[in-house]
Image: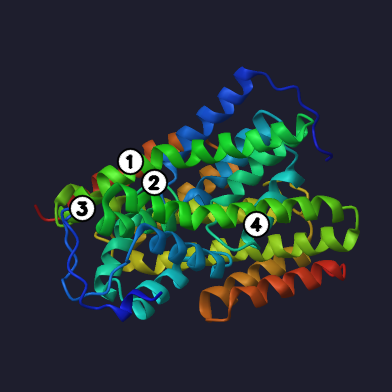
């Protein structure tokens, strides 16, 4: 079922404006997209990004690493779950809107059913203090994971067009407003996001 | 804090739906970055979920395979359960997931290709770089709220072993390539043994 067995499949009709290179392996069908992204999602605990990169770039070779990084940077700044955005963008490249929907359905459907089953099982077991404790422990780890994701992304601030101190000041103010003062997110985005965009715009050469 | 018992009318479901619709477009950096806002709204303002239910939903979704956004389905599920029926719970899942996915999906589908072609454009670069510090702040505040069990005076605010576990996980995940499953398993074990 691996698309890489057929490296010479003819190029698709250009569903989107970017056409993949002709000799690049590509998903064979909408079903292939759906199944591939289902399998990717099922391997991703606490985040799917690393798995997508390994499967799509290294194993299936649907896109090069550089292409992947470019797509990822766009997926990241768009609203919505990053990996869903990315799946959608990969699907779009090959099969247009239908591809986007297949990839998105693939990455969401089976994991959604699984997580609901998990919630049902947990509801049965939640009376046991051990089970509650286990989830409390996992929740603490999840908090650490989210913070780590933030810190990893913070490493890129050094390359930001705004001075590092300005970036850190915006990030710290945002944290205080959101976590401690509990200001609604929309206000913080308007205020600090707007400020950041203006500063970055001025910092970038026209 | 035990689960609230709710009576939900159409307007409440609509309010919930609209809330997720709006958050969807604000969820730069992923739905998880709007978690602190959801907690503020659903738990503190509306009282539709208990803090425990909220934290459990996030933790269950994190320890289950798939995109993090699925915690939103569990939030809808629990709100539905609080109104008393399984049908309502399933409606909650559908309403929440459509709400959180629909606007961002349409927007991204339309804009991603344009942004890809125009990635050298000054406005695109300014947006991308200007938002970066805030995206980090959103992630860190979400982590803070999860670790403290609901912010200042949250139920884990004084539980220092739990804070320590969060901090250690953060450093390990940040600095090493250890598979996340090991960390989740360790957290589950420490919790089950009553250490944290």
**In front: label 3 or label 4:** 3
CB within 8 Å, label 1 to label 2: yes
Secondary element at tag 4: helix
**In front: label 4 or label 1:** 4
- Give the mark nearest the N terminus, 2 or 3: 3
Secondary element at tag 1: helix
Which residue is painted at 61% across and 50% down in the image?
B71
- Chain name for mark 2: A
For label 3, the residue is: A15
- Give the mark nearest the N terminus, 4 or 2: 2
Which residue is painted at 36% across and 54% down in the image?
A88
Which residue is painted at 44% across and 45% down in the image?
B27
- Give the mark nearest the N terminus, 3 or 4: 3
- Residue under disc 2 on the same chain as residue under disc 3: yes
Secondary element at tag 2: loop
- Chain name for mark 3: A
Residue A119 visible in the current orientation: yes
Label 4 and label 2: CA atoms lie apart by 25 Å
Residue B2: % across, % down: 84, 39
Display colour scheme: rainbow
Answer few, some or many: residues within 10 Å of disc 3's Cα (few below 14, many 20 plus, some between 14 and 19).
Answer: some
For label 1, the residue is: B107
CB within 8 Å, label 1 to label 3: no
For label 2, the residue is: A79
Nearest the viewer among A72 and B171 is A72
**In front: label 1 or label 2:** 1
Answer few, some or many: residues within 10 Å of disc 4's Cα (few below 14, many 20 plus, some between 14 and 19).
Answer: some
CB within 8 Å, label 4 to label 2: no
Label 2 and label 3: CA atoms lie apart by 23 Å
For label 4, the residue is: A114
Report the side of A105 relative to A145 (left or right).
left
Residue A11, placed above or below residue B16? below
């Amino acid at each position: 079922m691996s698309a890489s067995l057929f490296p010479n499949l003819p190029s698709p009709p250009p569903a989107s404006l970017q056409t993949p290179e002709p000799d690049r392996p590509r998903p064979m069908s909408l079903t292939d997209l759906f199944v591939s992204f289902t399998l990717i999602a099922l391997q991703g605990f606490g985040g799917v990004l690393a798995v997508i990169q390994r499967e799509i770039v290294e194993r299936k070779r649907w896109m090069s690493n550089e292409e992947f990084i470019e797509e990822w940077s766009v997926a990241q700044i768009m609203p919505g779950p990053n990996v869903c955005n990315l799946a959608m963008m990969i699907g779009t490249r090959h099969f247009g809107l239908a591809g986007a929907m297949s990839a998105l359905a693939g990455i969401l459907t089976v994991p959604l059913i699984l997580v609901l089953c998990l919630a049902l099982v947990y509801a049965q077991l939640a009376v046991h203090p051990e089970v509650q404790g286990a989830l409390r422990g996992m929740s603490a780890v999840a908090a650490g994971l989210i913070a780590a994701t933030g810190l990893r992304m913070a490493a890129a601030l050094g390359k930001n067009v705004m001075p590092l101190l300005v970036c850190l000041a915006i990030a710290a103010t945002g944290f205080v407003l959101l976590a401690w003062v509990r200001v609604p997110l929309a206000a913080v985005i308007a205020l600090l996001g707007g400020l950041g965009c203006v500063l970055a715009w001025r910092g970038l050469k026209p | 804090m035990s689960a609230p018992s709710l009576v939900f009318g159409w307007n409440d479901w609509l309010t919930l739906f609209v809330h997720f619709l709006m958050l969807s477009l604000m969820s730069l950096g992923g739905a998880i970055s709007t978690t602190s806002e959801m907690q503020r709204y659903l738990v503190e303002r509306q009282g539709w979920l208990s803090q425990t239910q909220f934290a459990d939903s996030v933790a269950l979704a994190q320890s289950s395979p798939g995109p993090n956004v699925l915690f939103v389905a569990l939030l809808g599920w629990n709100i539905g359960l609080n109104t008393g029926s399984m049908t309502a719970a399933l409606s909650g899942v559908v309403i929440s997931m459509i709400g959180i996915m629909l606007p961002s999906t349409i927007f991204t589908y339309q804009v991603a290709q344009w942004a890809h072609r125009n990635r050298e454009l000054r406005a695109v670069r300014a947006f991308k770089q200007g938002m970066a510090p805030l995206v980090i702040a959103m992630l860190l505040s979400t982590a803070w709220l999860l670790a403290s069990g609901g912010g200042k005076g949250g139920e884990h605010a004084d539980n220092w072993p739990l804070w320590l576990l969060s901090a250690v996980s953060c450093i390990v995940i940040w600095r090493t390539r250890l598979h996340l499953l090991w960390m989740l398993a360790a957290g589950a074990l420490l919790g089950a043994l009553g250490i944290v």
